[in-house]
Amino acid sequence: MGSVSLKIGDGSARFKRATLCSSTVNVLMLFSVITTNLFALYAFTYSPKDHHANAVHHTHKNISLISEQVSLILSEIDSSQKKLTQMEKELLGYDSIDLSRPNIANELKLFLQHHQLPLGKDSRTGITEMVASVGHTCEKSMDLLSQYMDYKVNGPCPDDWSFAQKLILRGCEPLPRRRCFPRTIPKAGLQSFPISLWKNVSDKIFTWSGLACKNLECLNSKKLNRDCAGCFDIVKGYETQRYIKARGKNDFLIDDVLAMGSGGIRTGFDIGGGSGTFAARMAERNVTVITANLNIEAPFSEFISARGLFPLYLSLDHRFPLYDNVFDLVHASNGLDVGGRPEKLEFLMFDIDRILRAGGLFWLDNFYCSNDDKKMALTRLIERFGYKKLKWVVGEKINGSGKSEVYLSAVLQKPARV
Ligand SMILES: *[C@@H]1O[C@H](CO)[C@@H](O)[C@H](O)[C@H]1NC(C)=O
Ligand SMILES: *[C@@H]1O[C@H](CO)[C@@H](O)[C@H](O)[C@H]1NC(C)=O
Ligand SMILES: *[C@@H]1O[C@H](CO)[C@@H](O)[C@H](O)[C@H]1NC(C)=O
Ligand SMILES: *[C@@H]1O[C@H](CO)[C@@H](O)[C@H](O)[C@H]1NC(C)=O
């Protein structure tokens, strides 16, 4: 007689709290254990009732048939185990971060601990406990995360922001908070606003650790991305003409676009806005712009803030931490090129639409369409939102190696929907 033992997941599934979720999983698991064992029992004891009638099949039980059945059952059990583990993760949210595994930094455990509200359920919000927020995909990078959370409490933080950014780029966003002091850099020589918008500052006031370049001159000699080639030269470079002088029909002028908003453009959000030049030109026109960026290969955030502008350190995989209908303008260029499946761009576009007010403008600026399919997909997606096309230009540019590249620029006005 055989018996089948069921090992759940990696043996470390935890059901500490008697919540609705975990008891659902318990019941499901119990059910699974019973049914799979019954299956096994059945398989081992089953013999055909009519074996007297059938002379050909009245021999001994066919061993290979049985082992075939058993392996079927085992694979069935294996797949239900996987399903249960998956369900447990989905139901328990970040509790799928297994804090019982070895080498977990104690600070991570402390940060993720649930805190019961002292007076029980809060009548306004309906919550009974406070939970800390951390990206669910942190679970995939537990070793990195634990290393990130391994520091001296009240001491100086390790010099590891490039390491933190690596976690963010792997989807571990938001990162857990830490109780340490980051290195301070004396910000000597900052100018007052608005002189600060176009003034050189010393290389020494930026963080260069983890970067290939160690000064601005090095950065300016590189094409960091499609929207930033020499973009840290705000004294002599092309950056000083951007948005006020057009190089081609895909370049719109900032004053023309503001005129389309008929005076109602006071705030804006710039996605992947390089060194902050868009925000700088807008600031000169009394429009407040937030520039969203990561520090990929360059100290973008610090540079933007040195210009007296507002940097937002955020990956584009993160829902914008901004309320609905709050911006008069959203500006984006090749930062929108998020890759992956078409749905990925859709999620981003819907989030852009969410933060833009009705009547507000979406300025798509020199978006590189690597092929016709990409252009069509983006066009169809934009058209689905029902924006009014105030400007729409598809143009070609010859790139460094003499090849023609297609770019799309557009100014679109968000409709009022009911
Ligand atoms: C057992 O069954 C397999 C097919 O399932 C067959 O190939 C084999 O000949 C059978 N053996 C006996 C001893 O009946
Ligand atoms: C300003 O910075 C650029 C590099 O961005 C450099 O070439 C130039 O010499 C600097 N000018 C001054 C006055 O420091
Ligand atoms: C910006 O605001 C200041 C102070 O209110 C005003 O003097 C200036 O003319 C404004 N600039 C523009 C371009 O509107
Ligand atoms: C120019 O475009 C071609 C085709 O899109 C590409 O393969 C090449 O790398 C580009 N060259 C530069 C310098 O961007």
Image: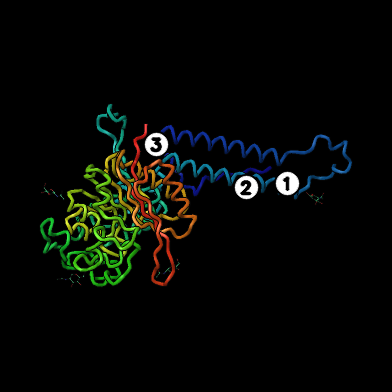
Which residue shows up at 10% across the image and 57% down it? Answer: 192
Q: Which amino acid does label 3 sit on?
A: Arg
Q: Quarter holding the N terminus?
A: top right
Which type of secondary structure does the marked residue at label 1 adopt? Answer: helix
The residue lying toward the viewer, choosing from 324 and 249, is 249
Q: Is residue 402 left or right of residue 74?
A: left
Query: What's the CA distance linking mark 3 and mark 1?
Result: 41 Å
Q: Is residue 26 left or right of residue 109?
A: right
Circle 2 SS class: helix
Residue 398 locus on image (x, y percent): 40, 67
Looking at the image, is mark 3 or mark 1 earlier in the sequence? 3
- Provide the residue designation for mark 2: 75
- Identity of the residue drawn at 21% across and 61% down: 303
Viewer-nearest of discs 2 and 3:
2
Marked residue nearer the N-terminal end (2 or 3):
3
Front one among 235 and 159:
235
Residue neighbourhood size for the residue with mark 2, other residues' Cα within 10 Å, grouped as few (<14), some (14–19), many (≥20):
few
The amino acid pointed to by label 1 is Ile
The x and y percentages for residue 246 are: 29, 60
Residues at marks 1 and 2 touching, judged by CB atoms closer than 8 Å: no
Q: Which of 11 and 204 is in front in this view?
A: 204
